[in-house]
Amino acid sequence: PRFWLIVPAAGIGQRMRAECPKQYLKLHNRFILDITLSRLLDNGQFDGCMVPLNPRDHWWPDSESARDERVQTCTGGAERADSVLAALDALDGQAADKDWVLVHDAARPCLHPHDLANLIDSLAEHPVGGLLAAPVADTLKQAGGEQPPSVELTVDRSRLWRALTPQMFRFGALRQALAECLADGQPVTDESSAMEFSGNMPVLVEGRPDNIKITVPSDLGLAEFILGRQ
Ligand code: CTP
Ligand code: MG
């Protein structure tokens, strides 16, 4: 099987409250999206890369990646899952059902190359696939319904993981699972949840907790620190 990459980058970064979508903010003087894409493509395993973009995006032509012939773009959708499905559709005709697709958030530039290689090595022989994930470190509280919230119970965290990306699944199975969830109105915040909904048990591959998703302004300094240290 071949390996394809999808990097959803069609979001508007509402929580960042910046003057442009967060994937076009700069760290160490490069677009976050360019850092993410070059780290992924440095792996050398991929046969192609599809980046769904927002229809209102006018920053992409200024990116380094726009001049990289390995990178293709398509129009994304209203939610992340719509953007990923649009990218899968755009790869139709290039990818085969049994090929692997790795989906990685544009907003996660701190992915360590060892985690990427380890994900691929761990899952290459697996029928379904899986995702990078990190064990939950904090004690978790479940609140009751009242305001102000108060603790109803402490959740057992011993089997809880934080879902990270990349998430790696077979092209045909992922496309079918996402299409079914979207048609059913099922909430899908990641590829794994779509695969779970269609009865699969994706593998959790432990990854570094510093593979953060840049979401709010304070994440920018944190990401710059993580990148500088790696
Ligand atoms: N994404 C996408 N298409 C959407 C929404 C999100 O491709 N319709 C992408 C984002 O660009 C990002 C990744 O999915 O790389 C993770 O989403 P998130 O962190 O939520 O980014 P935004 O939706 O842009 O941010 P916010 O939710 O704060 O608006
Ligand atoms: Mg979002």
Image (cartoon, grey):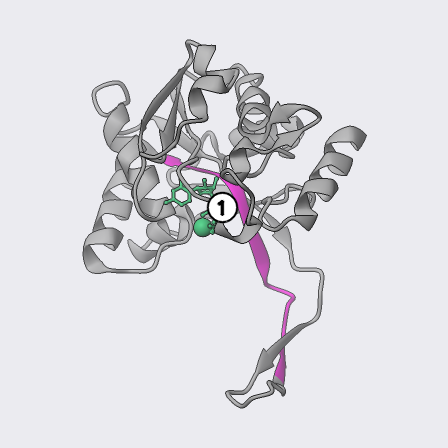
Q: Read off the residue under disc 1.
A: 13
Q: How many marks?
A: 1
Q: Is residue 181 above or below residue 110?
A: below
Location of residue 161 by image quarter: bottom right
33 vs 203, nearest the viewer: 33
Give, as a three-letter code, the residue at label 1: Gly
Residue 63 visible in the displayed image? yes
Asked if the magenta segment contains residue 157, the reply would be: yes
Magenta residue span: 153-169
Magenta span dominant secondary structure = strand
Location of residue 18 by image quarter: top right
**Residue drawn at x 64%, y 41% as measured from the top left:** 211
Residue 143 on image: x %, y %: 57, 82
Q: Would you say 92 lies left or right of 137 here?
A: left
Within 10 Å of disc 1 (Cα), the crowding (few <14, some 14-19, many 20+) is some
Q: Quadrant of the N terminus?
A: top left
Residue 25 on image: x %, y %: 59, 34
Location of residue 140 by image quarter: bottom right
Residue 230 visible in the displayed image? no
77 vs 5, nearest the viewer: 77
Q: Quadrant of the C terminus?
A: top right
Residue 58 on image: x %, y %: 40, 27
Q: Is residue 146 above or below residue 102?
A: below
**Residue drawn at x 53%, y 18% as measured from the top left:** 41
Residue 31 on image: x %, y %: 58, 26
73 vs 18, nearest the viewer: 18
Q: Would you say 176 lies left or right of 57 here?
A: left
